């Protein structure tokens, strides 16, 4: 028996590697060797699957990371550094982030989810940056940190994670 999460994880993988058009019921059932009945046991059609996939994306790639950082008893700068380490650890996230953003340009539900994710991420960065003792505008600094990541993912070829870490190390020097 395939779980709901396993269905979604296959969908996430297809999205990251082949884009939104690859996420079809036929493709998902083929990848998992399951029947359409098994799919419909977990989801109310393709629309229900898309909603579940977007919720999973929001939870796993935003909420989970914020919760992990918030769980530690540390100063804002240490939390910011921890968050950057978490974000930069998984190179597979880049393809997924690009695919979600591309899909958001064509689908209002995906766009709404992407806007929620962006708002949540930037709000958390702003919260951390407001706790810094630095002579800079915390809201603009938070925005800059986020835009560096998004820009690095969009430029071709993408910026290597080691190079992106170095860029972030340079920006963190602004708050020393």
Image (cartoon, rainbow, N blue to C red):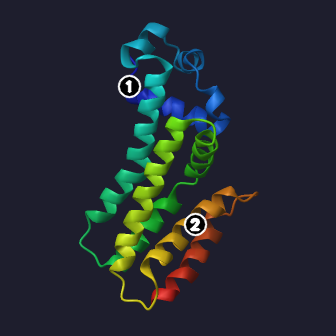
Residue 35 appears in view: no
- For label 2, the SS is helix
- Name the residue furthest right: 156
> Up-down: is 85 above or below 57?
below
Specify the quadrant of the image occupied by residue 59.
Answer: top left
Which residue is the site of mark 1? 4
Depth check, mark 1 against mark 2: the one in front is: 2
Label 1 crowd (10 A; few <14 / some 14-19 / many >=20): some
Residue 79, percent across and down?
Answer: 35, 72
In front: 52, or 28? Answer: 52
> Up-down: is 9 above or below 130?
above
Residue 12, percent across and down?
Answer: 52, 36
Is residue 150 left or right of 131 when viewed as pictured? right
Residue 28 circle label: none
Which residue is the site of mark 2? 147
Q: Residue at x 59, y 60 (%)?
A: 150
Q: Could you tell which of marks 1 and 2 lies nearer the N-terminus?
A: 1
In front: 45, or 91? Answer: 45
Whole-number angstrom distance, CA of label 1 to CA of label 2: 33 Å
Residue 124, percent across and down?
Answer: 37, 65
Q: Which quadrant is home to the N terminus? A: top left
Q: Residue at x 36, y 52 (%)?
A: 63
């Amino acid at each position: 028996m395939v779980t709901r999460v396993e269905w979604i994880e296959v969908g996430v993988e297809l999205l990251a590697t082949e884009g939104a058009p690859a996420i079809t019921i036929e493709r998902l059932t083929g990848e998992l060797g399951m029947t359409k009945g098994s799919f419909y046991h977990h989801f109310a059609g393709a629309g229900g699957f898309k909603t579940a996939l977007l919720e999973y994306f929001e939870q796993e790639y935003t909420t989970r990371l914020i919760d992990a950082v918030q769980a530690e008893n540390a100063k804002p700068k240490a939390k910011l550094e921890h968050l950057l380490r978490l974000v930069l650890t998984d190179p597979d996230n880049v393809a997924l982030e690009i695919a979600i953003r591309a899909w958001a340009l064509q689908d209002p539900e995906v766009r709404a989810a992407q806007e929620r994710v962006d708002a949540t991420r930037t709000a958390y960065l702003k919260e951390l940056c407001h706790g810094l003792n630095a002579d800079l505008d915390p809201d603009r600094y938070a925005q800059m940190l986020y835009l560096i990541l998004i820009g690095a993912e969009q430029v071709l070829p993408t910026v290597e994670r080691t190079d992106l870490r170095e860029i972030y190390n340079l920006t963190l020097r602004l708050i020393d």
